[in-house]
Amino acid sequence: MKVLGHRGAAGSAPENTQISFAKGLEYGVDGFEFDVQLSRDGEVVVCHDERIDRTSNGMGWIKDLTLQELKHLDFGSWFTKLPVCQEIPTLRELLEVFASLNLELNVEIKSGLIQYPGIGEKVVNLLGEFDQLDNSIISSFDHQLLLNLKQHYPRLKTGILYDSAPIKPWLYAKFLKAQYLHPAWYFVTPELVKSSAVLGIEINTWTVNSSFAAAKVKTARVSRIITDYPQCFQKGAAGEAIWLER
Ligand code: G3P
Ligand code: MG
């Protein structure tokens, strides 16, 4: 069972910024989940929301701002636990740091509220340039985007994000040629893990931030836990992730 830091280590540092990823590394994560969007000039930037209002000192849509305009803003000081000035990272900048660290990368492509033309191809090309395709999972709530990408890049590993309780989602994952299902933790059951495994599909779940959630997904034997608090997990003798209280 692997532990991936959610948006870096979003419980301890301003999400999706360099300091958040540095904290995650300090906590010994196996890898990271982070979200990507496209700036007005087509740069892949790391940010959860389509707008910058919540996590920066600016306002507006990422799609309307150039990278240079975004880089002038502070994406760190809003976070009261660790207010520190932070630039928005580009995917390229993160990969420059991650490429030599042997991490698992879960790149969540944001597509829905805003449909960014060519975002999937840009992400795949960057991961390829840094030789990170084999250790990366591309996930999205936009399943059509994942299927299209998989058809163009059969080697890609994709994860189907969902926050609901579909019937036999492993059949759906197979139909989409995905390797992973990424359910919200409360929809994880032992049956989901077992039935998916029969088809070679693994379960990676989010956002596991409490002892209750951790116990549920550990019992079901998921493959990966995505958490805001990677420091709260310790590896057990059998490789399971054990939650230590915050
Ligand atoms: O990828 C897991 C999780 O991050 C999905 O939801 O809204 O936190 O990006 P969200
Ligand atoms: Mg995400």
Image (cartoon, helix red, strand yellow):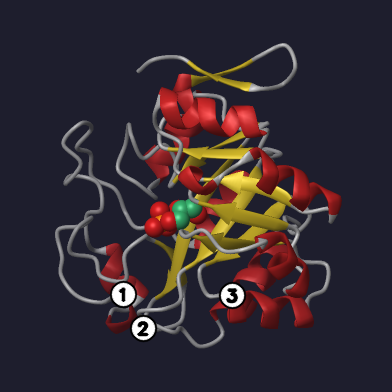
SS for callout 3: helix
What type is the residue that disc 1 sits on? Ile
**Residue to which mark 1 is pinned:** 62
From the viewer's perspective, is the residue at label 2 or at label 3 nearer?
3
SS for callout 2: loop
User: Residue 145 or 20: which is nearer the viewer?
Assistant: 145
> Mark 2 touching mark 1, by CB under 8 A?
yes
- Badge 2 density bin: few <14, some 14–19, many ≥20, Cα 10 Å: some
**Image quarter of the C terminus:** top left
Q: How many marks?
A: 3
The residues tagged by marks 2 and 1 sit, at their Cα atoms, a distance apart of 7 Å
What type is the residue that disc 3 sits on? His
Q: Is residue 96 left or right of residue 173?
A: left
User: Residue 147 or 218: which is nearer the viewer?
Assistant: 218
Relative image position of residue 201 (x, y in whole percent): 77, 54
What type is the residue that disc 2 sits on? Arg
> Mark 2 touching mark 3, by CB under 8 A?
no
**Residue to which mark 3 is pinned:** 143
Name which quarter of the figure residue 241 lies in: top right
**Image quarter of the N terminus:** top right
Residue 174's mark?
A: none
